[in-house]
Amino acid sequence: MSLETLDSNGSHIASAISDEVVIELNQVNKWFGEFHVLKDIDLTVYKGERIVICGPSGSGKSTLIRCINRLEEHQQGDIVVNGVTMDTNLKNIDAIRREVGMVFQSFNLFPHLTVLENCTLAPIWVKNMPKAEAEQVAMTLLERVKIPEQALKYPGQLSGGQQQRVAIARSLAMNPNVMLFDEPTSALDPEMISEVLDVMVGLAESGMTMLVVTHEMGFAKRVADRVIFMDQGEIVEQNTPGEFFTNPKSDRTKLFLSQILAH
Amino acid sequence: MAETMHEDTVFRPKPSLPPPPNTVGVVGWLRKNLFGGPFDSILTIVGGSLIAYFAYTLYLYGIANAVWSAGSYRECLDITRGNGACWAGVSVWMNNYFYGRYPDVEQWRVNLAGVILAVWLAPFWFPKVKAKIATGISAVLTYPFLAAAMLLGGEVGWFLQIMVGIALTAFAAVWLNVAASYAGYGSLRAALMRLSGFENKDERLQKYVLIGAFVVGFVLALLFQATWDLAPVPTVNWGGLFLTLVISGIAISSALPTGVILALGRRSKMPVIRVFCTAFIELFRSVPLITILFMAVTMMPLFLPVEVNLDKLVLVIIAVCIFAAAYMAEIVRGGLQAINKGQYEAAQAMGLNYWKMMTLIIMPQALKLMIPNIVGNFIGLLKDTTLVSIIGLYDILLMAKASGQDTKWLGMHTEPFLFTAAVFFVICFCMSKYSQHLERTIGGGYGRR
């Protein structure tokens, strides 16, 4: 569906990958009770790289990115983010979370705070930034996601697309060097998907390292440096978007692509 | 022709029309709520007549046929022949309903303590004044000691003296803060720095100024307290509504913080804390309050060393506090469970630690959801404290009963209890209304997602 819309907007935006490793996953395994949800995941993400992760539901793609900021705990293997190894040490976890922003499918804005307060809370309370400075940063970011006029409203007064853009601004307020997107457009009405994708494209153009779980294949074609396809807890295939969409190698990938691109 | 065929259809929304008559306004309301159909209409008429009948009877008994001044219950009965209320006795006993057996000449102390509390908490409703949380905490933590020293009188121990010093300093700080806010300094801290010339100095130096100001205030407070010469009034003389408010006030203000801690403990991942909190909550929730009261008053002293001779009132207050905390813990837990998991995840993903996440994100939302339950619990607690009459504390209920056993007013039972009911109704209704006001105003008042 949005494959067409985004393709007409422009071609693939230039990538800005450096050889500095930001995230490294080494033989990561995770179980939910008896259920083996991630199996021997190896993944290296370089600074500035934009990765789109897709796959059928239940394939472990959300769990994978949630392990990167410890919203889920992995049981085997190593996860290293910005040179910090993820372990049970709360200091390490906090250090990683300060540098990793996350955007959720259901926005998860704080309903009791205004849009501006949502964006200033973490800088003030985690980074000890003075309130005035935090508000200045937040307003700049709200302008970047094109909703500065909503700053004093509460999340409940905004549309879904506006809420998700606030959520992106809120994450950016911590000035992270990696952004994780967990199906950011899946809960949105069709008319609002493009306004969120536009913001994400802008973020990609600015050189942000991004891991995006999404079914928006148009976005993947336009933005991704690498597309990862997961099924049943494994990385089945990963390739550049050009190769991935035109020349998928595994039969599972072919089936998936034929199903999601059929309509 | 080709032109008209290729012209785009323009979408014009239909204009909004007013709703049909008889569905809005007074007529609409009556139709919808009272006379929706034949059955509804009959119910309305029958119910309305019943209400009118009871209201009229009550009016006859309480006002039209009532006696307002008489020397004894016998005189009342001679006039009313049992058809009207004898408010004369209630007004004679009024002072006891409110103050119990607190000596008449010392009752100004009770009034003053009440006024101090009201004045202490008043800045909550001043929009310009900041540090509202500090105001609340200072009142909850130190006011009880100040009130205890004022109400007990006599020689107070060194501990109480120190606490009274802190309380008076805190009270002064709260109002100096108000003054500083309205004088344009912003806050007491800012005013102190400006006036002492430490405005642009190091944080550490500023801290010394604050500590110095506190010490000066504390010494002044101690000197002031040394001039007090209050006649001792032991707690056995405390009673009436005053005693009811003391017990329930302490229980109410301690229930929320302890309840929050117990609820967090019960949801904790640490097994020892979780088991302890769960056991505490379940134990005290499964036992009737009256049992806890009896245990506290009769059995607790057996477990304590002989030298420790705790006042009966103190034991009762501890018992009620424990009981209230156990109930509050479950209310708070319910509120916490209503908060979406995504809120926790968003807070964690931003790097907030556990306590910041709880105080900044989770609790404000949970508390707003819990307001109706919390206030319901407070109202229940206020009424439950009348149980202390069973173990012989002369609260308003036992006072009401005692007035009917006075030789002059022997047999006067209905009137004191009607009066007590009215007093409770007024207090509880105000609490209920205030809680509705809070629900509407806290947290922007907009719908949650």
Image (cartoon, coloured by chain):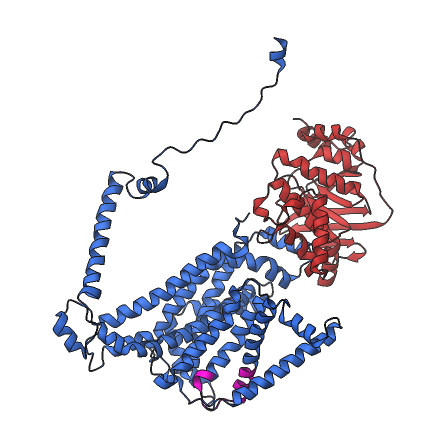
> In this picture, is B391 found above or below B23?
below
In-image side of B373 versus B364 (left or right): left
Report which quarter residue A158 is drawn in.
top right
Chain A image colour: red
Measuring from the top left, give residue A27's x and y in whole percent.
77, 50
Residue extending furthest toward the top: B1
Residue A14, can we see it?
A: yes
Q: Residue at 48% of width from left, 54% of height from top?
A: B440
Work out which residue is located at the far front of the displayed protein and give it.
Answer: B183
Where residue A42 sits in the image (x, y, percent)? 78, 47
The blue-tinted chain is B
Q: Quadrant of the C terminus of chain A?
A: top right
Q: Residue at x 72, y 42 (%)?
A: A212
Is B162 magenta? The answer is yes
Residue A194 magenta-drawn?
no
Q: In which quarter of the image is the N terminus of chain A?
A: top right
Question: Is B96 left or right of B215, judged from the image as shown?
Answer: left
Question: Quick check: can you spot residue A102?
Answer: no
Q: Is residue B77 above or below residue A17?
A: below
Residue B437: image location, x then y, percent = 46, 57
Q: What number of labels is visible?
A: 0
B329 shown above or below A135: below
**Which is more toward the observer, A117 or B372?**
A117
What secondary structure do most residues of the magenta stretch adopt?
Answer: helix
Q: Residue furthest right?
A: A19
Question: Is A202 placed left or right of B101 in the picture?
Answer: right
B275 or A170, which is in the foreground?
A: A170
Give residue A9's position: percent from left, percent from top.
75, 30
The residues colored magenta run B150-165
